[in-house]
């Protein structure tokens, strides 16, 4: 049976642990061995954590034997993006600027998840300081895409997505500031959940833009994402039973999100809409011109805060950074405080417009990314291509961050092409119920 473990959902692995069919120690050893021998392992994991994993698995095994499991995922291994602090284990956020940075304690979400029984397999590679939607990182490593190992995996939770897609972890925990969970999830045919800003504590997570940073899971199923969300918050998971699309009301956002779609993402999105409609969903279209204005504010809001947080560290050793990431950070240096404040005030007004125009609908639908995973070598050798593809990769997902939404991406019939469902802040449980029904329709 162990031959199939790498293809099972986290939930199914947890159920087998509960039945006594899987021992958490054997399960953890299975994944540690796969990590040790896989051809792309060093491109995916920044550092495996076998000592920690074995200790946590032993605890989970003892609880399972005593009938004291803490939840369905108790004993299930996961990978962690290398920006979540892990006590005594380096956390470097994909940057030489943080080389050998060893925190004294776990990030709050890591501590909570560990208490709920999740087993830490290791820390995964990521875009440098999480400031790219591509996943290209010549400073540490560039993880491969499951559908093309010469293409990037999507960022910034690139290694997290690859760890699940290549069978080196049942699930992964990442962060999302402008699309960093959803892009790699979509490009690697996974489910990814962007949670509402402020829902989970960011203490112990290396920041990029604290006004937008969020924590979220990447996994093989909507059920997995629901269970992982519950484990990260130490609470009961959402009840997904009886989920249906019958009479669900969706809106396709026309503004920006459908512009310049490449053929395969367009095909995958249209096919997904047809399947959702056949499953009973009512689908309309909406134009929200204010979204374009919000997108124009993004350059002020994201770069000013990112540079404000990192300026001192960056300027002490700029030569250590990937030049394209360095350049992106430095664009924030020229932004005036008055412009930053004005941008935030206007964004709050636009969010109110969005809420009013989308009220009464269950979710807003967009293609998760308008492009396919770009070739890593071309990104390194063609500056114009890098700039254009990075901006396009982040374009659609960033709408959710700017509007302050929660969002769920699901795979479509086209490889590396996802469809995103966006709902208001704090509506994750309702979104997950819709997502599970949509998952069945899209299968």
Image (tube, rainbow, N blue to C red):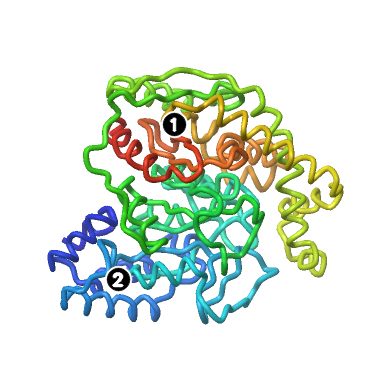
| Mark 2 vs 1, N-terminal side | 2
| Residue 318, x across and y down, in percent | 79, 63
In the rendered image, the vertical position of residue 105 relative to residue 383, given as above or below: below
163 vs 340, left or right, is left
Residue at position x 39%, y 38% from top? 410
Q: Secondary structure at mark 1?
A: strand
For residue 411, which quarter of the picture? top left
Residue at position x 33%, y 23% from top? 281
Label 2 neighbourhood size at 10 Å, few (<14), some (14-19), many (20+)? many
**Which dot, 2 or 1, sits closer to the camera?**
1
Q: Which mark is residue 363?
A: 1
53 vs 178, left or right, is left
Give 320 or 248, whichever is nearer the viewer.
Answer: 248
Quarter occupied by the C terminus? top left
Label 1 neighbourhood size at 10 Å, few (<14), some (14-19), many (20+)? many
Q: Secondary structure at mark 2?
A: helix
Residue at position x 27%, y 32% from top? 244
Q: How many marks?
A: 2
For residue 3, which quarter of the picture? bottom left
The residue that label 2 is drawn on is 28
In the rendered image, the vertical position of residue 124 relative to residue 276, given as above or below: below
**Label pair 2/1, CB-CB below 8 angstroms:** no
Give 361 or 173, whichever is nearer the viewer.
Answer: 361
| Residue 267, x across and y down, in percent | 43, 23
Alpha carbon separation for disc pair 2 and 1: 37 Å
Q: Which mark is residue 191?
A: none
Quarter occupied by the N terminus? bottom left
In the rendered image, the vertical position of residue 62 relative to residue 243, given as above or below: below
Give 54 or 249, whichever is nearer the viewer.
Answer: 249
For residue 292, which quarter of the picture? top right
| Residue 208, x across and y down, in percent | 65, 57
| Residue 82, x across and y down, in percent | 54, 65
């Amino acid at each position: 049976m162990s031959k199939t473990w790498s293809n099972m959902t986290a939930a199914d692995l947890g159920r087998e642990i509960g039945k006594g069919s899987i021992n958490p120690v054997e399960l953890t050893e299975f994944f540690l061995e796969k990590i040790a021998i896989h051809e792309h392992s060093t491109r995916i994991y920044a550092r495996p954590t076998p000592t920690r994993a074995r200790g946590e698995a032993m605890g989970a095994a003892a609880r399972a034997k005593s009938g004291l499991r803490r939840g369905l995922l108790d004993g299930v291994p996961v990978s962690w993006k290398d920006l979540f602090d892990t006590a005594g284990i380096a956390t470097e956020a994909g940057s030489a600027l943080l080389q050998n940075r060893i925190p004294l304690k776990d990030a709050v979400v890591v501590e909570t998840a560990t208490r709920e029984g999740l087993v830490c397999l290791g820390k995964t590679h990521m875009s440098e300081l999480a400031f790219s939607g591509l996943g290209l990182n010549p400073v540490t490593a560039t993880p491969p895409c499951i559908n093309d190992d010469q293409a990037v995996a999507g960022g910034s939770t690139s290694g997290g997505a690859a760890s699940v897609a290549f069978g080196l972890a049942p699930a992964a925990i990442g962060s999302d500031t402008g699309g960093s969970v959803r892009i790699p999830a979509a490009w690697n045919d996974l489910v990814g959940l962007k949670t509402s800003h402020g829902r989970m504590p960011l203490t112990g997570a290396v920041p990029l833009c604290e006004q937008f940073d969020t924590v979220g899971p990447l996994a093989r199923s909507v059920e997995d994402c629901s269970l992982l969300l519950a484990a990260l918050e130490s609470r009961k998971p959402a009840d997904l039973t009886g989920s249906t699309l019958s009479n669900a009301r969706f809106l396709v956002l026309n503004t920006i999100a459908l512009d310049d779609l490449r053929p395969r993402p367009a095909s995958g999105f249209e096919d997904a809409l047809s399947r959702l409609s056949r499953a009973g969903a009512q689908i309309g279209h909406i134009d929200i011109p204010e979204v374009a204005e919000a997108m124009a504010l993004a350059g002020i809001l994201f770069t000013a805060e990112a540079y404000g947080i990192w300026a001192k560290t960056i300027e002490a050793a700029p030569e250590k950074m990937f030049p394209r990431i360095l350049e992106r950070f430095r664009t924030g240096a020229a932004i005036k405080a008055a412009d930053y404040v004005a941008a935030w005030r206007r964004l709050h007004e636009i969010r109110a417009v969005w809420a009013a125009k989308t009220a009464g609908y269950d979710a807003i639908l967009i293609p998760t990314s308008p492009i396919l995973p770009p070739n890593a070598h071309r990104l390194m050798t063609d500056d114009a291509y890098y700039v254009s593809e990075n901006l396009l990769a982040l374009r659609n997902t960033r709408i959710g961050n700017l509007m302050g939404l929660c969002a769920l991406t699901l795979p479509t019939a086209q490889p590396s092409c996802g469809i995103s469902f966006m709902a208001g802040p704090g509506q994750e449980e309702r979104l997950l119920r819709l997502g599970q029904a949509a998952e069945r329709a899209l299968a």
